[in-house]
Amino acid sequence: MIEKKVRILLITPFFSPNVGGVESFLTEVVALLRQKHVALTVITYQPLIAKETAPIYCSEEGLEIIRLPWPKFGLFYRLEKHPILQFFYLGTGLLLGSIVKMVFSKRYSTVLCHGMSAAVIGVALKKLFSVDLVTNIHTNYRFVRSYKASFLASVLNQSRVVLALSQSTAENLKFIGVKKEIIQVFYNWINEENYYIADRQVTRKKLGIASDFFVALFVGRFSVEKGIYELVDALPDINRNIKILIVGGGKDERAVYEKVGKFENASCLGYKTAEELKVWFNAADILIYASMDEDYLGRVAIESLFSGLPIMSPKYSNYSGKITPNIAEIPSDVGLYFENGSKNFATSLNKLYESGEYKKFDRDFCRQHAIKKYGRAVNSGIYLRALGISDVE
């Protein structure tokens, strides 16, 4: 156990009740640090994507959350093709809020920054207040050598530790000049106690889903890299006895809803909270377009495995227009890869259902595989040590 004098300022553009992999992981980080009696302050925005709102300020023992009001108007998506403008959009409010907080609060021992925009803010706070800096990178950016990459490397090199979510991310950071001795690889863990395997038919009855359907669940933002548009294009070729359930939203949401609405075996469910998703995981037969990037699974895919739900992932990922092969291990009892393309996906899904191959999947093995690789016990110790906190209970 550590003393309460350890104080951490966590800076992130995205936090609950915004819905996403980063937000879910940050919930785990907050829970871990509170368990270690760290005095934690979170500076973030009111949800920039989700429609929900939350109190601007809330405080309970050992935790303070400040959600700054900030313009929405779909700007996060609108600015995706203008990264410099998006950077200022994500960073300006956090910078101002963080400086004010640092000036009028007790000294923080560490600033923990999530994402590149927060990392730049962290460097400014380090210079102004001589504070320890740790940065957590949540994306494999696939940087090429450029002035932009050199600038970002110089920013990250100001951190005492850079936490990378996969080996491929770490290699790319080293490629652009981030010092290898400060990079620490870990997987975004999940506390297995928060997920469970429930009776599928009982769950379906509660949700009003017919027991005789084969249910394929999609969860993700409506963006090219998540596969939503490919899935929509595949709908005409998918067996009508396969029920397609789509959770999520984002850019072109109205157009997606209109296209999906033409098919009786497909439905858009909108956003679901983390707690609601646990129920839907237990109602489905498989998670489709499970997010993956080279050697790591996206958080939703990991959560589904913890719930005993097998996964289907494309063989290649498309992030920022860069096509890369997915190489993460998917045991045959846990899921499968399919060839990219809407026709190929429909063929693979139909074959899985019509041949009965899906019956080979083992829900208990899905969960055990996830615990072994993505469990809290395996990865949280790495995270704590990076923050200078003992991982001994």
Image (cartoon, rainbow, N blue to C red):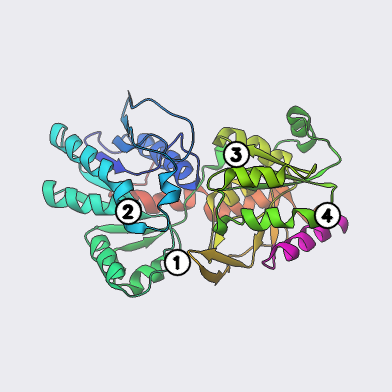
Q: Which mark is residue 85?
A: 2
User: For mark 3, does the 10 Å Cα neighbourhood hold few (<14), some (14 to 19), or many (20 or more) residues?
Assistant: some
- 1 vs 2, front mark: 2
Q: Name the residue type under label 4.
A: Tyr
- The residue tagged with tag 1: helix, strand or loop? helix
* Numbered label attached to residue 141: none
Residue 38 image point, x, y percent: 30, 36
Residue 311 makes an appearance in the image: no
The magenta segment is 337-355
The residue under the point 39% across, 70% down is: 172
Looking at the rendered structure, the secondary structure element under dot 3 is loop
Decide whether residue 375 is among the magenta residues: no
- Going by the numbered disc 2, the residue's amino acid type is Leu
Residue depicted at 65% across the width and 60% down the height: 313
Please state which amino acid type lies under the numbered disc 1: Gln
Q: CA distance from mark 1 to mark 3?
A: 26 Å
